[in-house]
Image (cartoon, helix red, strand yellow):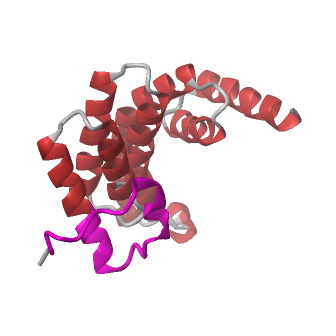
């Protein structure tokens, strides 16, 4: 049960909380309440989106996170962090799928394994196709974000967009030289 007398920690100190504890459920509940009362609370939307898009995020949490970032984008179409947040949240789905592609599975000659690889790759392409517009807009607004560039490199590679992948590799190389 949520104690209504408890206050939410400062969003900038949320990193200090144990993400595995019940405290995170309280933080999420309080953020949802704040957003319900003030749907244009960008800080709460961003914090909730970032919390929900953690490495153990479920599909519904990823969708809610993207929704939070979409609301921020609707308020400010030039918010690079919101595009980055949405793109990274969607990339969580790709990380989960790509982890299923083991060397044994990829190198197998078994028809069932080949079908499984094809299914996983098809789902990866769908996830990355959805993430791509967010990542591209983020890169347009903040061109030196290495995390976004690395994510774009992965997306372009999986989506067989070789020319775009090479562009991003050159940008990453130029950033390393600085």
Where on the picture, by quarter, is residue 9?
Answer: bottom left
Compared across the picture, whether 5 is left or right of 155 comes to left
Residue 93 against residue 84 in the figure, above or below: below
Q: Is residue 21 above or below residue 147?
A: below
Residue extending furthest toward the right: 177
**Residue 17 part of the magenta segment:** yes
Q: In front: 113, or 156?
A: 156
Q: Is residue 122 above or below residue 117?
A: above
Give me the residue at 69% from left, 27% from top: 166
- Tell me if I can see residue 135 in this picture: yes
Q: Is residue 112 left or right of residue 80?
A: left
Where is residue 64? Give x, y as percent: 23, 48
* Image quadrant in which you'd find residue 54: bottom left
Q: Position of residue 26 (x, y in %)?
A: 24, 69
Which residues fall within the magenta stretch? 3-27
Q: Is residue 117 visible?
A: no
């Amino acid at each position: 049960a949520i104690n209504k007398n408890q206050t939410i920690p400062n969003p900038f100190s949320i990193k200090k909380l144990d993400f595995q504890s019940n405290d995170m459920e309280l933080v999420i509940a309080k953020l949802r309440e704040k957003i319900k009362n003030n749907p244009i609370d960008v800080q709460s939307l961003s914090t909730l989106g970032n919390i929900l898009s953690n490495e153990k995020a479920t599909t519904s949490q990823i969708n809610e996170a993207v929704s939070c970032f979409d609301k921020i984008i609707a308020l400010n179409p030039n918010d690079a962090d919101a595009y980055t947040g949405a793109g990274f949240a969607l990339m969580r789905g790709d990380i989960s799928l790509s982890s299923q592609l083991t060397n044994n599975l990829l190198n197998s000659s078994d028809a069932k394994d080949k079908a499984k690889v094809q299914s996983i790759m098809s789902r990866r392409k769908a996830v990355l196709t959805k993430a791509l517009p967010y990542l591209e807009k983020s890169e347009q607004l903040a061109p030196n974000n290495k995390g976004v560039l690395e994510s774009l490199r992965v997306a372009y590679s999986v989506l067989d967009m070789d020319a775009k992948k090479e562009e991003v590799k050159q940008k990453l190389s130029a950033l390393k030289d600085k």
